[in-house]
Amino acid sequence: MSKHSTTIHARASARTEALHNPSPVVRANSMQTGLLNRNRILGIGCWNVRTFPNPGTQSLTTRKIYQYNVGACCLSEVRIPDSGSLEIKIPGAKSHFTLYHSDPREFSDWILGKTVHEEDGVELAAGRRLADLDYANFITLLTSSFGDLQSMVSRINVRPYLRDVYTRRLIQGPEKYRPRSAWKPWNYDSELLAFSHRIQEKMDVLTLQKCFTDESYASYINSVMSPDDKKASIEDNGMLALKGRQVAQTYVTSFLRAQYPNLPEEWVGCITDRLLSDTELASIGGHLGITDLVLYSCLPRESGSPLLPENTRPPSLTSIASCFLAVIGALAEDPKTAHLLVRDFILTRLTELDFCADFDFPMQDDPFPLLKQVLLSMNRGPPEPRLQWQCSMNTLLACYQIGIYSDTQLIGEAPGETLEIAEIEAGRQSLRNLFGIHDSRPPLPLTGSYSPPDISRRNKSLADYGCT
């Protein structure tokens, strides 16, 4: 920002006469009133200027405009240094004005120091006094840029407002939980139809409603029914969820075995358990909108309870996961449709998960016994760790690079803060390279035509390698 105030001409009223001599003129930065704070005396000016053909016969008046207290000044272009003040006296005028540097806590640049009261007419030319003239088209604020104005308004108005809103929210307390169905408009059948379009499957509305009926909701509603009305009782999604889990587990396991044939069965099961956990399935179901569709009850039914449960918290992760698995179970009549749903929504999570950090594989903490047995089954020599390079050994940023060799061939390498850490990490990286789950592996075929899974195929287990 320049040391001087950058200014522009302020436009005068519609009745302003033609300007023959451009001196003196009114110059100031312009800004509309909507950005100004109410009921505060700010360094703003509302100019009402009538310019006459003869030089020096120019007068100015100010009034209170709406809720703003304004000040005024009429002068030629004046530039003020960063410190001190400048007193301006206009010949023939009864008052004089002072421009001074503002307090940095309140304003950002030079402001008008003299304020003219309401209905006061300031005589700037001898023998002439004008009042009640039209206002200029701009209310001006003596700041150097729009960014300075925003900063000033934020300090004066926005911060106290936000602080007050935050304090009131703390006093009010947390807002009561209200599900999406409590807001209007809400049509449950339309939402079910929209869900079927989101997964691009044609499903009956009654079937979808059964998929989203949690066991807690069914028990809450059925508890008030008499034994004669058992035929009209509500069915929950328990059986469909169990069937859907079996279908998903079978397809995920077969898919991983086909894509990673060297991966041990225990490691395949570890990945499958992670993908089919309640946390992962609830995350997928939440992105599909199941959180708003599930019918559940937070508390069991008691005497005096309403006909429908009044939930005070969102559904649990287990409820959302069961609903998603129930949808897979409902589509299991056509295995291809169910398997494609699993591939499109569950297996795609593998693109975001890291085999190095997100899975706790067996025998990963001490990788060398398993690495030795894997190399032995491949008719290769035992692993030999070697120090490749080191740097900053006597500092807090020490780094050691360890490589694992077998028959003079490098099978894995990794850095570490100490020799022990680098050696263990290099052993883990060697196992990932041998099992085909290294960082440079090809992407999974998660698109394209459908191929049925080979259920009969199984990978080697840790017991087959001689490890338990």
Image (cartoon, rainbow, N blue to C red):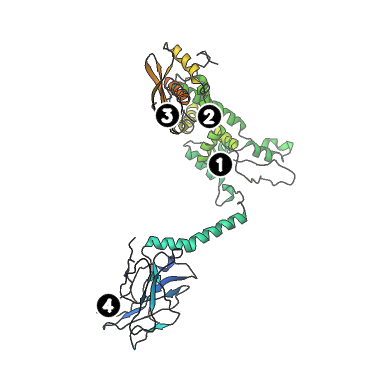
Identify the residue under disc 2: 274
Residue 394 falls in image quadrant: top left
Quarter of the N terminus within the rendering? bottom left
Instruction: Tell me: 198 left or right of 10.
Output: right
Which numbered mark, 1 or 2, is in the foreground of this view? Answer: 2
Q: Residue furthest bottom?
A: 127
- Which one is in front, 91 or 326? 91
Q: Position of residue 360 (x, y in %)?
A: 52, 27
Which numbered mark, 3 or 2, is in the foreground of this view? Answer: 3
Q: Residue flagged by tag 4: what amino acid is it?
A: Ser
Identify the residue under disc 3: 393
Disc 1/disc 2 C-alpha distance (Å):
21 Å
Disc 3/disc 2 C-alpha distance (Å):
39 Å
User: Which callout, 3 or 2, points at the residue further toward the start of the chain?
Assistant: 2
Identify the residue under disc 1: 291
Q: Residue flagged by tag 3: what amino acid is it?
A: Met
Could you say which disc has been placed on residue 23 in the image?
Answer: 4
Residue at (50, 40) in percent of width and height: 287
Disc 3/disc 4 C-alpha distance (Å):
76 Å
Residue 116 falls in image quadrant: bottom left
